[in-house]
Image (cartoon, helix red, strand yellow):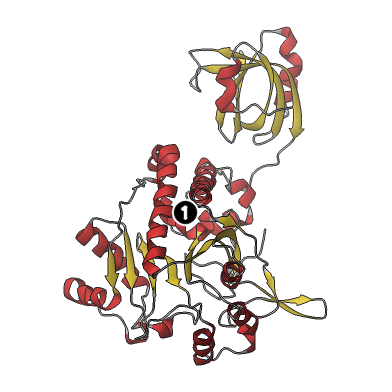
């Protein structure tokens, strides 16, 4: 049986169909019972007239049904201008209760005052809130559009292992797991394997997959498991080629979201989806520091010189809006000491990479990668990396084209797009230092 959704019912007026959904509300009046049914696309009214003898069995069934139970209804779809829910009602001839719901721990339609951790404990109920449904739809729409953009530009989607034999990148902040008679680690990112694919002759690759960070961080924008949108492509001449691609990718994603969900986002979250124009403003880090000092009286703390911190990211958003009327800003010329060893440096030791700030938060660290074996070995040794990256260094011994790439945290991107305050609301199931269930 093909499920007929609420938003498809206008195609079936006058027909007898089977409709399935949640019982959203029951209004038992003197002469009639109104039952509001719900699915992922909307709500519809089912009407049971008490004066009709044939309805006695249906009324008996519904008198024992609780709100949030699920039912299948054999019914006629009729137009009725008096019905507020789309001018359509369902007239049932048979009702089958497919599951009976117990009393809910909280009202998911009114989450004000409900503790966020209580919501996470019962996430499957929390997700029934229409705003949460919209979050999932918006995120899916954006990723679909970004994927489509890459497919249209001849990228190949790959799937890299999440169990690895050596601690990746710095060797810290990784989850160690028992792997038969030895240890394995959950991958922090697909970075090394993206580059391996390019060394293997694939010119353009991307992956949308989970990443794991064993950081004991309890901020609103960090999680121990998150979804990363990673890409890497070869034969570039500069990290500016990488920034150019990211501009196009984000414009493609935001354009599709605005077309499909722009009005719903404004209505439910009070945020306008703004399509940026190219090029995004770009500034050198030291110049931005100076602007912060002159305009806002802010000086970067000594320990953060050569990098950014949360306050600097917020000021970047303010500055980008005031100076360039933009929500986005690329920042370049970070200190090489603050970045991974595989980011390329020029002949003067200047890092060939960038960060992208959107709405006061970093969403990307991108770069041209170091593809020369000798330079990579030197950079790794400089950062004290040894056996953990030996397998990675092998990828570059037999020729590898100049290349670059970046990663975008999908959950963080969605959080910023909708103006949410925490990844707990954004992720389908949040994972943090204090949450491993459900």
State left or right for residue 343 relative to residue 296: right
> From the image, which quarter does the N terminus lie in?
top right
Residue 397 drawn above or below residue 83: below
Locate the C terminus by quadrant: bottom right
Specify the quadrant of the image occupied by residue 72: top right
Above or below: residue 92 compared with residue 146? above
Where does label 1 land, which residue?
Answer: 414
Question: x and y percent of residue 372 in the render?
Answer: 51, 81
Position in image of residue 109 (x %, y %): 53, 41
- The picture places residue 20, in percent across and down from the top left corner, at 68, 28
Task: Say which of 3 and 229 sits in front.
Answer: 229
Quadrant of the rendered structure where residue 433 is? bottom right
Label 1 Cα neighbours within 10 Å, binned few <14 / some 14-19 / many ≥20? many
Give the residue furthest to the left.
294
Depth check: give the residue in front, 415 or 240. Answer: 240
Q: Residue at x 52, y 73 (%)?
A: 217
Residue 23 position by quadrant: top right
Single out the residue that lies furthest toward the right.
181
For residue 129, above or below residue 316: above
Please give the name of the residue rendered at 51% of the width and 58% of the height, measured from the top-left corner: 411
Q: Kindly give the residue lying farthest to the front in the view shown.
A: 399
Query: Picture coordinates of residue 15 (x, y %)?
Result: 65, 13
Residue 161 showing in the rendered view: yes
Residue at image coords 25%, 80%: 299
Q: Secondary structure at mark 1?
A: helix
Q: Nearer the viewer, residue 235 or 215?
A: 235
Instruction: Identify the residue at image location x=42%, y=64%.
Output: 242
């Amino acid at each position: 049986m093909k499920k007929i959704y609420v938003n498809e019912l206008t195609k079936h007026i006058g027909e007898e169909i089977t409709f399935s959904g949640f019982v959203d509300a029951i209004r038992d009046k003197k002469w009639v019972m109104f039952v509001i049914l719900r699915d992922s696309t909307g709500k519809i009214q089912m009407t049971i007239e008490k004066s009709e003898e044939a309805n006695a069995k249906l009324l008996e069934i519904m008198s024992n049904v609780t709100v949030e139970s699920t039912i299948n209804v054999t019914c006629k779809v009729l137009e009725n201008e008096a019905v507020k829910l789309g001018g359509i009602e369902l007239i049932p001839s048979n009702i089958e209760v497919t599951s009976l719901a117990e009393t809910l721990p909280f009202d998911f339609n009114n989450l004000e005052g409900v503790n966020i951790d209580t919501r996470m404990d019962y996430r499957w109920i929390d997700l029934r809130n229409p705003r949460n449904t919209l979050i999932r739809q918006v995120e899916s729409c954006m990723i679909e559009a970004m994927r489509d953009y890459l497919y249209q530009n001849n990228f190949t989607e790959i799937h890299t292992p999440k169990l690895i034999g050596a601690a990746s990148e710095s060797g810290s902040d990784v989850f160690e797991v028992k792997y038969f008679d030895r240890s394995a680690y959950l991958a922090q990112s697909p970075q090394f394997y993206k580059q391996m694919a390019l060394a293997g002759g694939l010119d353009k690759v991307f992956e949308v997959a989970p990443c794991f960070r064993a950081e004991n961080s309890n901020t609103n924008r960090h999680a121990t498991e998150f979804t990363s949108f990673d890409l890497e492509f070869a034969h570039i001449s500069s990290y500016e080629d990488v920034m150019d691609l990211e501009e196009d990718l984000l414009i493609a994603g935001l354009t599709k979201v605005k077309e499909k969900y722009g009005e719903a986002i404004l209505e439910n979250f009070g945020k306008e989806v703004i399509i940026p124009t190219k090029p995004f403003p770009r500034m050198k880090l030291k110049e931005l520091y100076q602007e912060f000092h002159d305009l806002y009286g802010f000086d970067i703390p000594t320990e953060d010189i050569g990098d950014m911190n949360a306050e600097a990211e917020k000021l970047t958003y303010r500055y980008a809006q005031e100076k360039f009327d933009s929500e986005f800003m690329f920042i370049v010329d970070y200190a090489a000491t603050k970045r991974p060893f595989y980011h390329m440096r020029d002949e003067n030791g200047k890092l060939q990479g960038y960060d992208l700030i959107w709405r006061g938060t970093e969403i990307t660290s991108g770069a041209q990668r170091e593809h020369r074996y000798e330079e990579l070995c030197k950079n790794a040794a400089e950062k004290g990396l040894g056996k953990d990256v030996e397998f990675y260094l092998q990828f570059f011994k037999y020729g590898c084209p100049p290349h670059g790439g970046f990663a975008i945290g999908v959950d963080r991107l969605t959080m910023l797009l909708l103006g949410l305050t925490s990844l707990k609301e954004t992720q389908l199931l949040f994972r943090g230092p204090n949450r491993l269930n459900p």
